Image: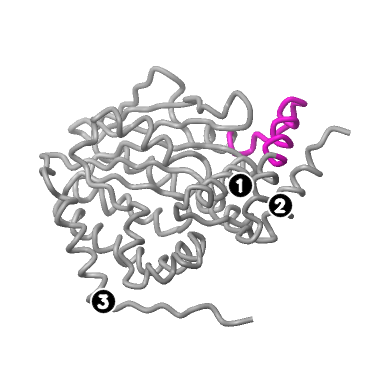
Amino acid sequence: MSAAPKYTYTPEQVTAAFDEIKARLFCGITVEAIPKMLVVAGLQGSGKTYLLEKNLLPSKRYDNYVRLYLPDYRKKHPQYPEMIRLGVLHAYEHTEAFVRELSAKIFTQVFTGKYNIIMECAFDSIEFAAFPPTATAQGYQFETHIVGCTQEFAHVSSIKRALKSLENQEMERFLTVSKLNTSMGYAQAIILAFETAAKAVSGSQITVYERGFGVLNERTVRAQSTYTKAADGSVTTTTTLRPFEYIVYSRITDNHVFAVNGHYEIVKECHLALLKAGTHASYVPAFVYNDLYTYIAKYVIR
């Protein structure tokens, strides 16, 4: 078997890509008296990007915000044309280091300039827990939307998303159970850091949603809090629903499929994913088939 191609890039090429993106990224964007941070958080596959792009951004409330990452930024890699010949999964994998450096440059420019920021957080690094205090020290007001779901739902959804990306020739990847489990392990520390940040700057908000198989696929709001900080440092919480607590999120992630209808839904979704995987068999990793069959064996009603 031949070795995978080796791709390289220089710091100057990262800077060139940044300069090209910057020219349009900040067009029409102005700095506000109180800088704002829109955070959409959740496991990969939970539906946070869908929430952002289909619900939040169309409201036009965030037109004066800078989004830190878009998949198209990966195409700025100097050897992207060579990568994409080997498929979107290959291109995604081999642009990861480049796009991280590029996104870091974008973040530095946006954060030091105190522009409003749109950030997606997949709980994939514990470093996210250290970031909110740094932002509130700069006066950032947080609006955090957290999408909760079980590990099974996130995993099957991520597989469906990757299969769709193969169909549409969009860059994506297949996630392993171990990576999702690692993210679940980081979630509590990161979410509690967002809660602390929300209470540090008056007017900040946290909203928690639940997604799951069947009727929960469309997402349901489970908790929401708005925090007002007085001059003496005291914080008042208001809500029209249940106030935010971490336990709201943890109960969602621990809410495994028990009802018969829930079993039917997960088995159905796994079978449909297996059918689609067959049309892209040359690109789908072997572990994906194993994972889907494992869920079927676990939840099938005998």
Q: Nearer the viewer, residue 265 or 85?
A: 85
Identify the residue at image location x=37%, y=37%: 52
Q: Position of residue 201 (x, y in %)?
A: 24, 38
Q: Position of residue 206 (x, y in %)?
A: 37, 33
- Other-residue count near label 2 (Cα within 10 Å), few / some / many at <14 / 14–19 / ≥20: some
Q: Which residues are magenta?
A: 252-271
Identify which amino acid the numbered label 1 is placed on: His
Which label was assigned to residue 11? 3
For the residues labelled 2 and 3, the Cα–Cα distance comes to 39 Å
Identify the residue at image location x=38%, y=32%: 54
Say what secondary structure mark 3 lies in: helix
Number of marks present in the image shown: 3
Q: Position of residue 192 (x, y in %)?
A: 43, 44
- On screen, residue 156 versus residue 101, left or right, reads right
Identify the residue at image location x=47%, y=33%: 245
- Other-residue count near label 1 (Cα within 10 Å), few / some / many at <14 / 14–19 / ≥20: many
Mark 2, residue position: 291
Mark 1, residue position: 155
Quadrant for the C terminus, please: top right
Picture layout, residue 226 above or below residue 50:
above
Identify which amino acid the numbered label 3 is placed on: Pro
Say what secondary structure mark 2 lies in: helix
Identify which amino acid the numbered label 2 is placed on: Asp
Quadrant for the N terminus, please: bottom right
The reply to whether the C-beta atoms of the residues labelled 1 and 2 are less than 8 Å apart is yes
- On screen, residue 140 versus residue 45, left or right, reads left
